[in-house]
Image (cartoon, rainbow, N blue to C red):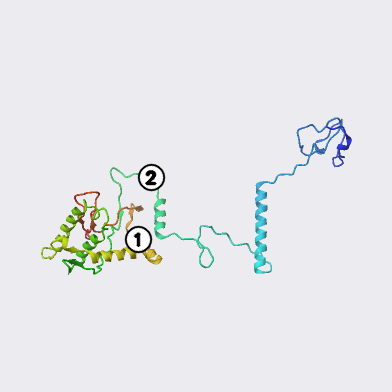
Amino acid sequence: MADDDSDLEPLSSLKRSVNDGKFSDDDFVERKSKKSPVDNGEVSDDDFVEKPSKKSKKEKKHKKHKSKKKKEKKRLKREHGGSFDEAPEPKISKKAKPTSHGLREIKEKVPLQRLLDAMQDYKWWEDPPNEGDIKWNTLEHNGVGFPPPYQPHGATLLYDGKPVVLTPAQEEICTLYADMPLDGPQLGDPNVAPTFNKNFFADFKTLLGKNSVVKDFKKCDFSQIRAHCEVERDARKNITKAEKEAKKAIAEEHKMKFSFALVDGHLQAVANVMVEPPGLFRGRGLHPKTGTLFYLLPNVFLRI
């Protein structure tokens, strides 16, 4: 410590009591350093400094919340005029999308999501096991769903330059062939196209019958049906949002009806509940059955 007295300031703020040359514990607050406060009988005020008390996190959080609440009241008072002691409106999650009215709305769960949530609540592993090979005792299910019936479009098949009258079932098969891309892996591949055309025409002639005028595949002209398919394809790409929502609602209704079953009174999900619509088998590469027609299964009663 310096010997010059001018470097020392009076310690009048300290209540010093001389008892055997020592200070009591009440004379000082917390030390600033670990150095001894007494050196040559002199005490420097640099050795001791009053340390501010630390506030707890709870007090800081309460003060911050109180300040925000006060600012919100002032804002409401400016907007509405006069005193406004009502609490501010609760904040809504940012995930909610703003509406046209400037408000925010919470998206409700659709019925399909409610069924899925109810299914997950069931803890099957907590049920006692069945005896022997018995897996379940009761089963309730709506069966399988069938695709919507075919709607004729009226486009004409030309044979040797002349229109051919077709039934709805025959027109559907022609449409399936005309909808195949000409540059695709079936009709666009010179190695696959002959087999594909041969298998298709064999099944098509069987459907036409023996009395049909269609005898040679090379004389068939699918241009008008192919043009109709292109128009339908473009229309599907340019559907409106309302039409998309309508299709989505129909699909969800279909899924709610057929995609769940009650097994022993508990809801269970069922996969592959839609019967595959008719089409032409494509296969991979040079498959011997490529182009073969697979038919739509008729509505039958299924026995479980």
Relative to 283, does residue 212 appear above or below in the rendering? below
Q: Amino acid at mark 1?
A: Ala
Which residue appears at 65% of the width and 58% of the height? 69
Q: Which residue is at the far left?
A: 211
Q: Nearer the viewer, residue 295 or 218?
A: 218
Q: Position of residue 235 (x, y in %)?
A: 34, 65
Q: Earlier in the sequence, mark 1 or mark 2?
A: 2
Classify 221 as above or below 49: below
Element type where label 1 sits in the image:
helix
State left or right for residue 289 relative to residue 138.
Answer: left
**Residue 20 horizontal side relative to residue 151, left or right:** right
Crowd rating for badge 1 (residues with CA inside 10 Å; few <14, some 14–19, many 20+): few
Residue of label 1: 251
Q: Residues within 10 Å of mark 2 (few under 14, many from 20)?
A: few
* Amino acid bearing label 2: Trp
In the picture of the structure, the residue carrying the numbered disc 2 is: 125
Checking the image for residue 3, the label placed there is none
Nearer to us: label 1 or label 2: 1
